[in-house]
Image (cartoon, rainbow, N blue to C red):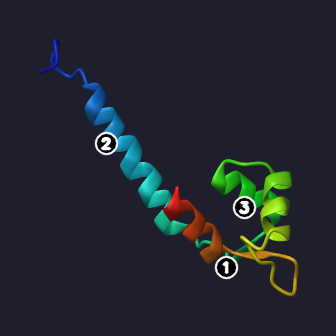
Amino acid sequence: MPAFEGEIEVSEIEQAARRAVQLYAESRPRPSQVTMTQAGEMLGITRHTVSKMVKAGQMKLNRCGLIPVEQVDRMLETV
C-alpha cells in the first residue's frame, strides 16, 4: 500500500510500462524480413555472429539478402 495518498507503487509503474510497450508493438507492423544487423539487434548478438550463423546454415537469407523475421522468432524461442 502506498505511504501517501496518490503515490504509485513500483509494480503499477511496471504494469503501465509493459502495457505501453505492448500497445506500441501492436500498433506498429512488423517487417516480414530484416537485415543481418537488425536480426542481430533482435537476438542480442552482433551482425558478425549472424553472418557466421548464415554461413553455418543456422539461418538463411532470401533472394534479397534479408532474413525472414520468422527465422529470428524461431531463434528467440530456442533461447
What is the three-letter code of the residue carrying label 2? Gln
Give the vertical position of 33 relative to 72 (above or below).
below
Q: Residues within 10 Å of mark 2 (few under 14, many from 20)?
A: few
Residue depicted at x 61% and y 71%: 30
What is the three-letter code of the residue carrying label 1? Ser
Residue 68: image location, x then y, percent? 70, 78
Q: Quadrant of residue 12?
A: top left
Q: Quadrant of residue 64?
A: bottom right
**Looking at the image, is mark 3 or mark 2 earlier in the sequence?**
2
Q: CA distance from mark 1 to mark 2?
A: 29 Å
Q: SS for tag 1?
A: loop
Give the labeled residue for mark 2. Answer: 15
Residue depicted at x 85% and y 62%: 51
Residue 18: image location, x then y, percent? 39, 47
Q: Residue furthest left?
A: 1
Q: Nearer the viewer, mark 3 or mark 2?
A: 3
9 left or right of 59 in image: left
Give the labeled residue for mark 3. Answer: 39
73 left or right of 23 in image: right
Q: Residues within 10 Å of mark 3 (few under 14, many from 20)?
A: many
Marking on residue 32 = 1
**Looking at the image, is mark 1 or mark 2 earlier in the sequence?**
2
Q: Residues within 10 Å of mark 1 (few under 14, many from 20)?
A: few
Q: CA distance from mark 3 to mark 2?
A: 28 Å
Q: Nearer the viewer, mark 1 or mark 2?
A: 1
Q: CA distance from mark 1 to mark 3?
A: 12 Å
**Looking at the image, is mark 1 or mark 3 earlier in the sequence?**
1
Q: Nearer the viewer, mark 1 or mark 3?
A: 3
Residue 25: image location, x then y, percent? 51, 62
Residue 40: image location, x then y, percent? 74, 55
Residue depicted at x 79% and y 59%: 50
Q: SS for tag 3?
A: helix
